[in-house]
Image (cartoon, rainbow, N blue to C red):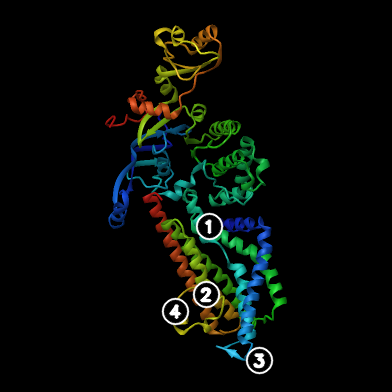
Amino acid sequence: MSTPEPALQVVALTRTFRVFERRRGLVGGLRDLLHRDYRELRAVDAISFRVAAGEMVGLIGPNGAGKSTTIKMLTGILVPTSGEILAGGRVPHRDRIAHVKRIGAVFGQRTQLWWDLAVIESFTLLGKIYGVPAAALADRIDRLDAILDIGALLRTPVRKLSLGQRMRCDLAASLLHAPGLLFLDEPTIGLDIVAKDGVRAFLRDINRQFATTAIITTHDLRDIEELCPRILILDRGRLLYDGPLDRIKAAHAGRTRLMVDLLAAAPLAALQAIGGAAVTWEQVGPVRYRATFDRRVTRPAELARALLNRFAVSDLQIPEPSIESVIRRIYAEGAVPPPEPAGAAPPPEGGRR
Amino acid sequence: MIRALTAFARAGFLRLVAYRLRYVTGILTYTINVSVYYFIWRAVYAHAAPGTELRGYALSDLVTYVALGWIIRSFYFNNIDREIAALVEEGQVTTYLARPTSLLQAMTGLAAGESLFRLATFTGPITIVIFLLFPVGGPAGPAAFAAFLASAVLSFAIFAYLNFLVGMVAFATRSIAGLISAKHYTIQLLSGLLMPMAFFPDWLRLASDFLPFRHIAHTPAALYLGRAAGPELLGALGQQALWAAILLVACRWTWGRMVRRLVIQGG
C-alpha cells in the first residue's frame, strides 16, 4: 500500500513579528517618539507536521501559543517568515485565491454570514463567490440540512439567530463549496452544553460523510476527546507534541486527582489510611480533601469505593485535567511523550530553553 | 467575477429591505435639505429683479440644480468607508481575505445593489415630493436628460471609489471617524451639491477642475440644465468617466498593496 498524498504538509514553519517595545515613564515616552525599539517575537517556531486526507487534527495550546498565527499561515492569509507549507500541491500564500477556493474556515468568534441577510441569501452569495453552480448548491444545502438541521433557519436574518443556530449555519456556509480542507477556530466557543454536543456531532458526521480533512483549534478538551484522535500541542510557538490524545493523558495518569467533600471534617491521618503510600492526601478546605495518585497503580474506582465505605461523603469528583494544566506540566517538566515512530513530526529541537 | 458582483448587488438590495424606518426618515431628510437650500436661494434672489441671473443662474435654475443634486444623491449614496472601518475594527477583514473575492468587488457590489434598491423605492418618491413642493424645471432636452442619467451612474462610481479609498485608510490608522466627516463636508462643498461651481472663488473653482469631486453632483445637474451640449456634453461625460477609471485603478492598486501588507505584516 502506498502512502496517500498528505492533505497538508508543513516543514519548519516559522513566523516572527516585530513588536514595538515601549520605554517606561515620561522621558521614555518622549524617546519613543524619536526612536522606537523593536523586539523580535517568534510566534511560530520551526514547526513540522503532516495531515493525511480525511484526518481530524486538534491544534491546542494556551493563549499566545501560536495557534492563530499557524492557522492564518495555513489559510494563506499570512506569509511565513521561513519554512514551507504545501496544501493540495499549492503554497497557500503564493496562490492565495486558488488556495482559499478549496478550503473552508470557521472562526467561532466571528461570522462569515451577512448580518442583515436571511441565511439562504448569504448561502446564495457564497455559492456565487465560490462559483458553485445553482443546482449543485441546492443539493449541497439539502445534504447539509440533513446533518445540521438548518432548513427552518434559512429564511431568518442572521442577526436573529441564537449563537448555536448561527454556528450551525456558519459551519454549513464553510462547506457549501465542498472544501477538501476545513479550518475550525474554536467552533464551540460560547455555546451551551447542548449546542456544543450538537456541533461536535455535526463535525463527526461531516467528517464521515464528506471525508473532509479538518484542523480544529480549541480550548475545550471535550472537543478534542470527541473529535480528534490526534493532537498537536503548541506552546510559545513550538510544537511540543504530535500524537494521540490518549498517550498524553496516559503520560499524566501519574498525577490523577480526586477531590472529596466529607459531611464532617476528618483527621488527615484517617484519609491517609486509604490507598496507602501510593496516594498523597491534602486538606484543601474545611471538609474538602484532595488525593493525588497514579491511576495506573491505584484504580480511581477503588479509591472512591473505599472512601464511600468509610466516610460520609457529600461530593466526590475526579476532575479531568484542563488542556492548560496538561500543557503547562508538559512544558514545565519537559515531559513530552516519545513521538510516533512513523509519520509524525521530529521532536522539537534544542529541548527546553 | 461579474457573477459574484451581481450576487453582491442582490445581497446589497436585500439588505436594505430590512430597514423600513430609515426609508421614511430618509424621504423626510431629503425634503428638508432641499427646502433649506430652496429658501436660502430665494432669500439670495429676494431683492433682485425677477429674471436676474447671478453667475449665469436664474433662481429657477438654482432651484432645479439643488433639487436634482439631492435627488441623485438619494441614488448614488453609500457608506462603503464606514463599512470598511467597521470590518477593520471587528477584525472581519480576515474573513474577506480567506475568500476568493476582493473587498473592492464585495463593497462596490453591495453598494450597487443598495443604489438600485434606493433607485426603485426611494428616489422615485423623493422626486415626486420635491417636484410637488418646489418649482423644479424639466430637463433641457432629451439629449440633456439622457446625458444626465448616464452621468448619475458615473456619480455612483466616483462616490463609491472615493469612499473605498477613504475606507482603506482605516487599515493604517484604526479609527477614521474624523476622516469620514472631513470627507463628508469636502464632498458636500466641492461636489457642487450646495451650489454650482460658478459661485466659488476663482482659485477654488480652478482647483475643483482638477479634482474628482465636482463630477459627483455638479456634472449631472449641469447636464440636466443643458449647460453643456454637443461635443461639450460628451466632453463632460468623458471627463467623468476618466475620473471613475482613475479612481478604480487607484482602488485596485491600494487594495492590492493592502493585501500584501496584511499578508506580510499580519494585520
Residue A120 disc label: none
Residue B32, given in percent of the width and then of the height, sits at: 65, 71
Badge 1 density bin: few <14, some 14–19, many ≥20, Cα 10 Å:
some
Is there any visible trace of residue B19 in the rendered image? Answer: yes
Viewer-nearest of discs 4 and 3: 3
Disc 3 marks a residue whose amino acid type is Pro
Alpha carbons under labels 4 and 3: distance apart: 32 Å
Can you tell which mark lies on residue B189? 2
Give me the residue at 47% from left, 60% from top. B176
Q: Is residue B143 visible?
A: no
- Say which label, 2 or 3, has the lower sequence index: 3
- Residue A15 against residue A308 in the figure, above or below: below
Residue marked by disc 1: B83
Q: Amino acid at mark 1?
A: Glu
Comparing marks 1 and 2, which lies closer to the viewer?
A: 2
Please report contact status of discs 2 and 3: CB closer than 8 Å, yes or no: no
Instruction: Measure the C-alpha gap from mark 2 to mark 4.
Output: 13 Å
